[in-house]
Amino acid sequence: MAIKVIVTCEHAGNFVPAEYAGLFSGHKKLLNTHQGYDIGGRELFNCIAGEVADYRFSCGVSRLLIDMNRSLLNHSLFSSLTKNLSEKQKERLRQKYYFPYRQRITALIERLIAEHNTVIMLAVHTFTPVLHGKRRGADIGLLYDPRRKEEKRLCRSIRQNLRVLLPELKIRFNYPYRGSSDGLAAYLRKRFPAAGYCGIELEVNQKFSISDKRQWQCMRKSIARSLRITLPKLDI
C-alpha cells in the first residue's frame, strides 16, 4: 500500500477580494496580525511541501473573511467583521471560497483511498506567542487524535527526528490546541477511516518568523528535513 502525502495551509495569506474591501475599512492593521492569517505559515508550508508533498493546497484568503479551518457550525467560521453579513452574503462566501477549497481536498483523499493508498495529511499552521496576555509554552506543537494510534505513532516519530535537528526547541503534543478540536484534519477523520487516513496538524510558534529571519529560514529547512526523514520510514 503506497503512502500519499497531502500538505495544506488553511491560513496562508491575508488577501481580501476587492468586493469585500469595504468590510475592512479601518481594519487594515488587523489583517496583518495573527488574526488575519498565520504569520510565517506560507513560507513554512512552501518549504515543507517542497520536500514531502505529493499534493499541496493552500488558501490565501484571510481567515477574517471566512475561516477554511472551521466547520460550518463553528461560531468562528465568520469573524467579527463578517458575522453580521446577510445569510445570502455568507452563502456566497461559502460557495466561492470555503466549499471549493475543502471539497477539492476531500475528493482527492477519497480517490486516493479508493486507489488503495494511505493518505497522510499534514496541515501547516503557526500560532501567536502570546494569547489573551498569556505566553504560550511551546515552540512546536504536533496535533493528532489520541484515539487514532497511527496518528500518535506518526507524531512521535516526527518529534524524535525534530529533536535531533532542533534539540533546543520545546515540542509538545496537542498544544496549543487539541488535535481533536474543530479543524479540517478533524473533519476529515469523520469522513475517512483510520486505516486510510492520518490527519496531523503542525503548529509552529510565530516568534521565530517575526524575530530573526535567518534563524527562521534555517528552522523551516530543519522542520522540512525532519519530515522528509520521517515519512519514508513509515509502515502504515
Image: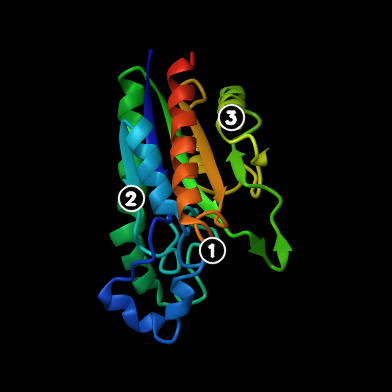
Q: Between residues 18 and 111, which one lies in front from this camera angle? A: 18
Q: Which numbered disc flags the more N-terminal residue, 1 or 2?
A: 1
Across and down, in percent, residue 1 comes to 38, 12
Is residue 37 visible to the viewer in this orientation of the structure? yes
Q: Secondary structure at mark 1?
A: loop
Looking at marks 3 and 2 on the same chain, the residue that comes earlier in the sequence is marked by: 2
Q: Quadrant of residue 178?
A: top right
Of marks 3 and 1, which one's residue comes earlier in the chain?
1
Type of amino acid at the residue the image marks with label 1: Ser
* Mark 3–mark 2 distance (CA, rounded to whole Å): 26 Å
Residue type beneath disc 2: Tyr
Local secondary structure at mark 2? helix
Q: Position of residue 185 (x, y in %)?
A: 49, 41
Q: CA distance from mark 3 to mark 1?
A: 27 Å
The residue under the point 66% across, 45% down is: 175
Residue 83 in sight in this render: no
Residue that badge 2 annotates = 101
> What's the residue type where badge 3 is placed?
Cys
Disc 1, disc 2: CB below 8 Å?
no
Q: Residue at x 39, y 85 (%)?
A: 25
Which residue has dot 1 on it? 76
Residue most extreme to the bottom: 26
Say which of 167 and 14 sits in front.
167
Q: Nearer the viewer, mark 3 or mark 2?
A: 3
Q: Tag on residue 155?
A: 3
Please name which of the two marks, 3 or 1, marks the residue nearer to the observer: 3
Residue 34 vs 146, above or below: the answer is below
